């Protein structure tokens, strides 16, 4: 079955599993973990969050790959790729919010305690860290010493939503991030961001022109740049490869 077919059948095949997931998270409401955790991240719906993840998963071969999720929030990408699509990934999620990372770790433990473990044949690994990807000691803080040399580093850098807030210097931030992502990703990076074609723009957010973003990615050293914008009206994903 190809990736697109897997994604299209994701909700149907995993409906019961998702029910257990939501039940488990709802029981943990006292720990601020619940089935509506996407709201903590500012996403409009779970479906929109999954649509962004799906754009990533169906356009890149991620099975057996190492992924760094920058601004990982609660680590929902890891659960989507592994429990949802059955992929084996070496996943590291980082966020500058310590509370977000502690909640992601707690959520993972709750899922495991409620029997939602990956099958034995799934060789995924997962780590959540409070870290700043721009810090000089970032790579050293990850500690790849226990891994085989071939496993050290990341195949893909992924970021979803970290560029959405209007910071007043978004283009500078974006350019700096793309350069850093090209340094860290063996294959390249993938980022989703808000599209300027959106018909319902909101003031706290920043909307981008895909052509400008492509130019920034090429300036950062990407040899191949693609835009995917067919999954949500107000969003697009840039794929930058070395």
Image (tube, rainbow, N blue to C red):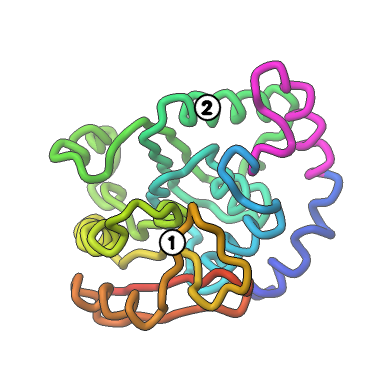
**Mark 1, other Cα within 10 Å: few <14 / some 14–19 / many ≥20:** some
Across and down, in percent, residue 84 comes to 68, 53
Position of 139 relative to 101 (above/below): below
| Magenta span includes 30 | yes
> What residue appears at the point 31 percent right and 67 percent down from the top-left corner?
187
Residue situated furthest front in the rendering: 203
Q: Earlier in the sequence, mark 2 or mark 1?
A: 2
Taking 207 as reference, is 150 left or right?
Answer: left
Where is residue 75 drawn, in percent x and y? 53, 41
Residue 147 image offset from top left, x and y in percent: 29, 39
Please give left or right for residue 195 compared with residue 44 in the image. left
In magenta, the rendered stretch is 17-38
Residue drawn where x is 58% and y is 62% of the image: 52
Q: Nearer the viewer, residue 16 or 1?
A: 16
- 211 is higher (above) or lower (below) than 102: below
Instruction: Say which residue label 2 marks.
Output: 105
Instruction: Describe the element under mark 1 as helix, strand or loop.
Output: loop
| Proximity of marks 2 and 1: CB atoms separated by less than 8 Å | no
Left or right: residue 146 compared with residue 124: left
98 relative position to 184: left or right: right
Residue 121 drawn at (x, y percent): 61, 47
- Main SS of the magenta segment? helix
Q: Does the magenta portion include 161?
A: no
Closer to the camera in the image, 66 or 51: 51
Can you name the residue that lies furthest to the left here? 136
Residue 206 marker: 1
Q: CA distance from mark 2 to mark 1?
A: 30 Å
Residue at 21%, 58% in the rendered image? 176
Image: 97 above or below 62: above
């Amino acid at each position: 079955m190809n990736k697109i077919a897997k994604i299209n059948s994701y909700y149907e095949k995993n409906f019961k599993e998702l029910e257990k997931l939501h039940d488990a998270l709802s029981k943990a409401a006292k720990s601020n973990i619940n089935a509506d955790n996407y709201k903590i991240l500012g996403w409009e719906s779970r479906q929109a969050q999954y649509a962004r993840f799906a754009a990533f998963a169906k356009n890149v071969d991620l099975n057996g790959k190492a992924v760094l999720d920058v601004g990982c929030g609660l680590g929902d990408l890891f659960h989507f790729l592994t429990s949802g699509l059955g992929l084996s990934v070496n996943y590291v999620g980082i966020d500058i919010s310590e509370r977000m990372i502690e909640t992601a770790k707690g959520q993972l433990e709750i899922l495991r305690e409620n029997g939602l473990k990956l099958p034995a044949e799934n060789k995924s690994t997962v780590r959540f860290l409070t870290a700043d990807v721009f810090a000089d000691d970032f790579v050293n803080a990850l500690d790849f010493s226990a891994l085989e040399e071939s496993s050290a580093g990341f195949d893909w850098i992924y970021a979803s939503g970290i560029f959405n807030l209007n910071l007043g210097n978004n283009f500078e931030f974006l350019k700096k991030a793309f350069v850093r992502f090209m340094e860290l990703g063996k294959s390249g990076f993938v980022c989703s961001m808000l599209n300027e074609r959106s018909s319902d723009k909101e003031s706290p957010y920043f909307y981008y022109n895909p052509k400008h973003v492509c130019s920034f990615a090429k300036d950062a050293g990407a040899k191949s740049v693609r835009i995917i914008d067919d999954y949500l009206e107000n969003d697009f994903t840039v794929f930058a490869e070395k």
